[in-house]
Image (cartoon, helix red, strand yellow):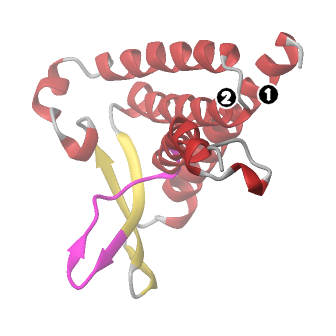
Amino acid sequence: MSQARITSRVLAWAAVALAADQISKWLILNKVMVPPRIIELTPFLNVRLGFNYGVSFGLGSEWLDAWPGALGLFKFVVAIGLLVWAAKSETNLEQTGLSLIAGGALGNAVDRWRQGAVTDFIDLHWAGYHWPTFNGADIAISIGVSLILVVSLMPLISRSVPSSTGLKGGSK
């Protein structure tokens, strides 16, 4: 596959992740959560509006109050690096995973630049315990990381599969 085609695919995946994240956040902020409330969808899933002023799980919010754009700028730089890495990668799964991570990082960076915090609204809970509220960018990042882990484990898996299956791997 040509480098131009790979780069186009990488940018397309990142754009899909970014667009899905920003559209879902716009809908939540401007349509669904007007007025803000808790919407119970299932016994374990709510829509609950929240804003993350820190890093992961709100960590570092005190430091970021003094430098509100710092984390957004950092995420933007990291996303560009991930896109360059993805464009140079030789496997489709790695390209897709890195692109989704970059698109998710850009989605959260846009929030930080636009409003100083990341909009979160997906609330998973069970038996009174709540996972930290998250958003579409976080889902894209999680899927991307999962794909990168699969790519990383593939050499180990292929070595342990007997060659009689037709897959690359160990000897008989």
Cα separation, mark 1 vs mark 2, equals: 8 Å
Look at mark 1 in the image and give the residue it sits on.
Answer: 9
Look at 52% across and 28% down and name the residue there.
Answer: 106
Look at 46% across and 12% down and name the residue there.
Answer: 77
Marks 1/2 in contact by CB < 8 Å: the verdict is yes
Whether residue 145 is visible to the viewer of this picture, yes or no, is yes
Report helix, strand or loop for mark 1.
Answer: helix
In which quadrant of the rendered view does residue 89 lie?
Answer: top right
Whether residue 36 is visible to the viewer of this picture, yes or no, is no
> x and y percent of residue 6 in the render?
80, 20
8 to the left or right of 53:
right
> x and y percent of residue 20 in the render?
65, 46
- Please tell me whether mark 1 or mark 2 is closer to you in this view: 2
Classify mark 2: residues with Cα within 10 Å, few (<14), some (14-19) or many (20+). many
Quadrant assignment for the N terminus: top right
Residue 26 versus residue 87 in the image, above or below: below
Which sits in the foreground, 67 or 163? 163
Which sits in the foreground, 134 or 62? 134
40 to the left or right of 61:
right
In which quadrant of the rendered view does residue 99 lie?
Answer: top right
Of label 1 and label 2, which has the lower sequence position? 1
Look at mark 2 in the image and give the residue it sits on.
Answer: 95
User: Is residue 134 shown in magenta?
Assistant: yes
- Range of magenta residues: 124-137
User: Is residue 144 shown in magenta?
Assistant: no
Look at 57% across and 61% down and name the residue there.
Answer: 31
Residue flagged by tag 2: what amino acid is it? Gln
